[in-house]
Amino acid sequence: MIAIISDIHSNTAALQAVLDDIARRDVRRIVCLGDVVGYGPDPGDCLDMVMAATERTLMGNHDYAVLYEPSKFNIGAEAACYWTRQKLEDEPDAERRAARWRFLGSLQVKHVEEDGPLGLGNLVFLHGSPRRPVNEYVFPDDIYNAPNKVQGLFDRFDHLCFVGHTHLPGVFLEAPDFYTPDELDGVYEVDPARKALVNVGSVGQPRDHDPRAGYVLLEPGLVRFVRVEYDYKPVMSKVRAIPELDDYLGLRLQEGR
């Protein structure tokens, strides 16, 4: 099995709950689709945990913004990026500080596994979209509002593509269609002859009105959506205690939005 996580957003409580759940399932391979940092109160610890636990991590738009410069971010997200950068710079352990920046600077924007394991065919991993891997959003409403965009995305991969970025889990099909995990009873059975774009959801800041941390498991012939309970209240308190972080970034955790 392979676990795919994304959009941790400096939330160690959610990340630890997910890593514990993955360990209980005896899953050895973990791929992270990016946005390890941004929004939340624990960027350094989350980077340390991801560096230790994952086989591969890709570049998210918040990782990029902290490393370089935020672009087209709202005021709260931009302020969180600048605070995150300063927080990482203020790490007193020079070796740990350098390792974190080195890790962020090494992140690739896309990973492809040809003839992947588990009978799932070719697998593509990235943060945003097959067209713009770091920062293009693919929303469920795009199947109605931008069908040509969706078709253009499907033209750029061969079978299965896994993304994050919107924090909204579900499966896009080429028709175009979109199915939530609830509509799939939590499982998408992979059709070898059919392409699918799978959003794995968010570990640290879900936005589908379910506050539980979310991730995906790849199993033989199927994609399983997993939700994990965690105590978000201490995270909300941490956010409130940091003047540079908008209180809303903590408040939204309790409603998953």
Image (cartoon, rainbow, N blue to C red):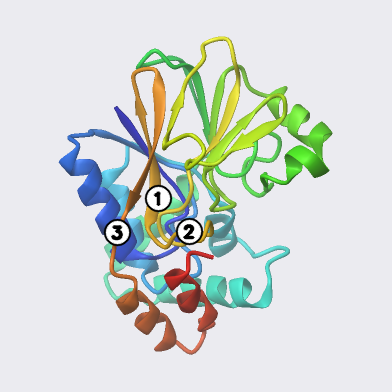
Pointer 3: residues within 10 angstroms few (<14), some, or many (20+)?
A: some
Sequence-first tag of 1 and 2: 2
Sequence-first tag of 1 and 3: 1
29 or 81, which is in the foreground?
Answer: 29
**Residue 133 placement: quadrant:** top right
The location of residue 34, given as percent across then percent down, is 48, 49
- The amino acid sitting under disc 2 is Pro
56 or 195, which is in the foreground?
Answer: 195
Task: Give the distance between the C-alpha atoms of the residues marked 2 and 3, in whole angstroms.
Answer: 12 Å
Q: Secondary structure at mark 3?
A: loop
Mark 2 and mark 1 in contact (Cβ < 8 Å)?
yes
| Residue marked by disc 3 | 229
The location of residue 37, given as percent across then percent down, is 46, 62
Pointer 2: residues within 10 angstroms few (<14), some, or many (20+)?
A: many
- Quarter of the image with the N terminus is top left
| Residue marked by disc 2 | 206
The location of residue 51, given as percent across then percent down, is 31, 49
Q: Secondary structure at mark 1?
A: strand
| Residue marked by disc 1 | 214
- The amino acid sitting under disc 3 is Glu
Does residue 185 lie above or below 155 as drawn? below
- The amino acid sitting under disc 1 is Gly
Tell how many labels: 3
The residue that appears at 65% across and 65% down in the rendered structure is 70
Q: In the image, is 180 to the left or to the right of 70?
A: left
Q: In the image, is 188 to the left or to the right of 75?
A: left
The residue that appears at 29% across and 59% down in the rendered structure is 229
